[in-house]
Image (tube, helix red, strand yellow):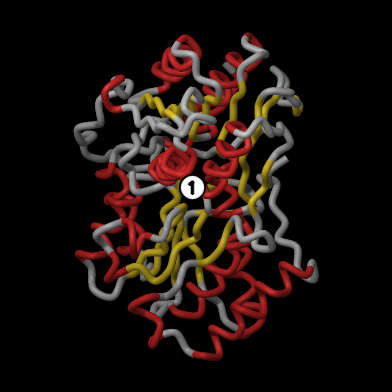
Amino acid sequence: MKKSIYATALAASAALTLAACGSAPESNSGSETSAGQEQTSDTAANADFLACMVSDSGGFDDKSFNQSGYEGLTAAVDQLGIQEKTAESTSDADFAPNVDSMVQAGCKLTIGVGFLLEDAIQAAAEANPDSQFALIDSAFSDADFKPVELKNAKPILFNTAEASYLAGYLAAGMTKTGTVATFGGMQIPSVSIFMDGFADGVAKYNEDNGKDVKLLGWDKAAQNGAFTGDFENQAKGQNQAEQFIAQGADIIMPVAGPVGLGAAAAAEAADGVHIIGVDSDWFESTEYGSIVLTSVVKEIGQAVQDTVGQAAEGKFAAEPYVGTLENKGVGLAPFHDFDSQVPQELKDAVTKLQDQIISGEITVETQNAPA
């Protein structure tokens, strides 16, 4: 199981760098949506199309990528009059059984949410060539990690390094202490890509302005940094953020799903510390809007809705979707309550950088970019 082996090894390595943290909070139960919960419609053309989704271990109420994916599915159900079925995972051990349960239920399209479901989705796609599959945040690969293209499985990918570059530049321009930070849940490409872009954005601000803003939590060149080891234990996120705050960080970007909410709690309890959210607009999706400077947004919901729509209409295509600044698949959320505090000169600089990335004048380099 190449992805689980890869993630487990990296998580174990990362865990050696972290202090011991509190016990995990109570997790969501991993169970399928019952038949009575499945939404149906009288729309004759689509009424028998069953679209299904399996979550990563964060569950569908994670205020992050699982929730965004599920919102895209429910939007497609409402729009098209199709049926849905879902299964929440609480650990890696749930992935394969949950995906298999979708196949056995007769799902026409099964979507896995997250890099760690690659093994389960790929195995199911290879074993069921007449069914269709999609995978958020990962392409497919063989045992040697060489890319594999499957005719019935679509990767849904996001070049978040581009939007994170803007967030890093903004953070460096807004810090009062001269220190910002980022950390991840697990060291996998869909997490590290955020951190790569953030690091480059901080470096670009320093270069443009003759500053020396310090970044904690990630060394892009070494591909080494701070990781909590999972996407569930909010106490670990709080602990990691408190360590950064003790070292002077006043802006933190957690790339860790629900674990990031623990970091937000630590920031809220501190004086003058702000958070940059990821995946969704945290001002809208979490209770921490008052400390959210901005968010690096992946339009997962729209990508899922489009993919389901294409499949329901008989137009499924296995070619990867890659969200970028240019196609608005990724972006920087509004500054909301902080809009009046961000200097116009800094806003203009961020806008110029975005235009330069879209035009190709600036390329945000990352070894974790979508294949």
Q: Position of residue 114 (x, y in %)?
A: 50, 35
Q: Position of residue 51 (x, y in %)?
A: 49, 28
Q: Position of residue 131 (x, y in %)?
A: 61, 17
Quarter of image, res 123: top right
Q: Position of residue 57 (x, y in %)?
A: 37, 30
The secondary structure type at the circle numbered 1 is helix
Q: Which of these two is toward me, 280 or 185? A: 280
Q: Which residue occupies 34% across, 34% down?
A: 59
The answer to whether 125 is drawn above or below residue 195 in the figure is above
Q: Can you name the residue that lies furthest to the bottom here?
A: 344
Q: Is residue 224 left or right of residue 81?
A: right
User: Can you see residue 285?
Assistant: yes
Q: Which residue occupies 42% across, 64% down?
A: 276
Q: Which residue occupies 40% across, 82% down?
A: 339
User: Can you see residue 17?
Assistant: no
Q: Which of these two is toward me, 352 or 126? A: 126
The answer to whether 269 is drawn above or below residue 135 in the figure is below
Q: Which residue is mark 1?
A: 301
Q: Which residue occupies 29% across, 66% down?
A: 289
> 10 Å neighbourhood of mark 1: few (<14), some, or many (≥20)?
many
Disc 1 residue type?
Gly
Q: Which of these two is toward me, 2 or 130? A: 130
